Structures are given as structure tokens and as C-alpha cells.
Image (tube, helix red, strand yellow):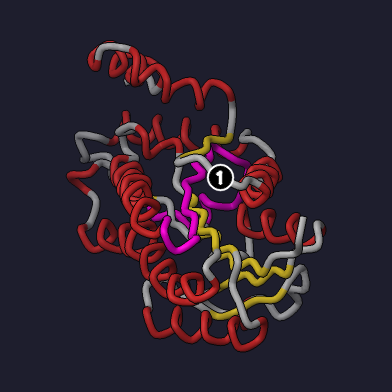
Amino acid sequence: MQSKVVLITGGSSGIGKSIGTYLKSKGHIVYGTTRSKAKYPDFDDFALLELDVRNAETIAAAVAELIALEGRVDVLVNNAGVGITGPIEETPHEEIANAFAINFHGPLLVAKSVLPQMRKQRSGLIINITSIAGFMGLPYRGIYSASKSALEIVTEAMRMEVKDFGVKITNLAPGDFATNIAAGRFHVTADKESPYYEKYNSTLENINESVAHGENPVQVALAVEKIISSKSPKVSYKVGATSQRLSILLKKMLPQKVFEKLLLKHYKL
């Protein structure tokens, strides 16, 4: 496969780092992004550009720098994201807005920034990293589910709008992978006076255990390479544990209340 110039947001750690390291090993020219390069003085897995997906100026500057260096951008992997957990009633609304700024508005801003160059090239690929959680409303992860679901849907619209320009857009929805996402996640600290205290904390333990025992993130990197190699990418891809991928099918097939009961049983609610 011909070498591609690849830009990966949130590339300094977790899934983004795994994707970048793997693609570089396959001969691609990889640039990752981070909000602060100063935090990674010894990072040498691949080149890093400074970019905050909440800040349009930093996005424009990073994309301009990449084009000045390489003359093109072939692939954008919109990977930067943030976790958020808590009872929706008790989640500060500024944290809800921040989650949408990073998980939904950010990927759109970056995509809009690379599209003029991709249209000029008459080629390009945008892979939006969504989540299996975005296919269903999960208790105490409702805001995260909603932000990823919004990105999933808007991608479906964008790919139809840009197809005549030679640009392809697709979604890649991972399940739970063993990364450090929990370290950067916002989570409500419900006190013992909260009516949600017991069930929320038991659910949070369930969530953390799933991530800790999640799949190897290199699986996501393999999926990204498969998409890059495809002449006609699908609308959406899923990667992760079989049970998590199966949950999407069950939601489509089962009556709504039956599926809801399955989730309640899983989370012991």
C-alpha cells in the first residue's frame, strides 16, 4: 500500500498512540496531536503537533503546519475524546458542554479544517472514532453515549455530502479497550447523601473493570489500517469484544423494554 500522510488527534497516548505507532511501522507518515507538547519531551514514536480540539485557532495552525511540511493530508483519524460518567441530574452542565466540545464539536472542527486540502487533492479519508456506547443509552454514561452517537450520525450525513470530491468518511466504533482513558475521565463524585450513591458507584466499578480488562488497543490500529486499505469504506465499523458488538445487534432486534432489562441486569440496577 502506498505511504499516506496521516493525522491522528489525541495521538500522544491510549488508542491514538497505538494507531500511530502501528501505522508508522507500516511505512505511513504519521503526525499525532496533543494539547501540550511540553508534557511529552521524550515522545519519539512519531511527530507531534500541538492542537486542542476545542480551539479552532490551534486546529487551523496545526493543519497548516502539516500541509507546509508534507504538502498534503491523506488520512485524518479523529480520535481525541474524553470520558464522562455520573447521574445526569448531578452532572455539572459545564462538564456536559465540555464533553460535547471534545467528543462532537472537536472532530467536526478538525474535519472542516482538513476538507479544503482534501478537496483540492481530490482524495482523502476521515475516520471518526466513535464508540459502541454511542449505539445505546448506557446508565451513568448517558452523556458520553450521546456525544458519540451524535458524531456517528453526523458522519453519515457528511460522507454523502463530500463523496463527489473524492473524499471518504467513515465511523469506527470501539468497545472497551485497556487504555488510560479513566485517568482523564470526568466522573461525578456522588456523596452518601445522593439518591444515586449506591447504584452509581457499583456501576462505576463495573465500568472501570471493563476498561481494565478490555481488549488490546492494537485491534483498533488493525481496523484503521483495514479501512485505509479499502477502496470503498463502509459507513461504520465496530471493533471490540464479541459481546459488545453483539449488543448493537440485540438492540436492533429486541423489543425496547426487553433490551432495557438486559442492560439493567448487566449493571445490576
Answer left or right for 44 relative to 154: right
When the figure is inspected, residue 190 is found, relative to residue 105, above or below; the finding is: above
Question: Which span of residues is magenta-colored?
Answer: 163-189
Q: Nearer the viewer, residue 92 or 27?
A: 27
Residue 49 appears at what percent x and percent y?
A: 60, 79
Residue 251 appears at what percent x and percent y?
A: 35, 20
The residue depicted at 32 percent of the width and 29 percent of the height is 199
Callout 1: few (<14), some (14-19), or many (20+) C-alpha neighbours within 10 Å? few
When the figure is inspected, residue 225 is found, relative to residue 43, above or below; the finding is: above
Q: Quadrant of residue 185?
A: bottom left
Give the residue number, with chain letter if any, for mark 1.
Answer: 232
Picture quarter with the N terminus: bottom right
Is 177 inside the magenta-drawn segment? Answer: yes
Q: Disc 1 marks which amino acid?
A: Ser
Residue 47 seen anywhere in this rendered image of the structure: yes
The residue depicted at 37 percent of the width and 72 percent of the height is 54
Q: Secondary structure at mark 1?
A: loop
Answer left or right for 86 relative to 13: left
The residue depicted at 31 percent of the width and 16 percent of the height is 259
Residue 96 appears at what percent x and percent y?
A: 26, 56
Q: Nearer the viewer, residue 140 or 143?
A: 143
Count all numbered tags in the image, as a single digit.
1
Answer left or right for 193 relative to 98: left
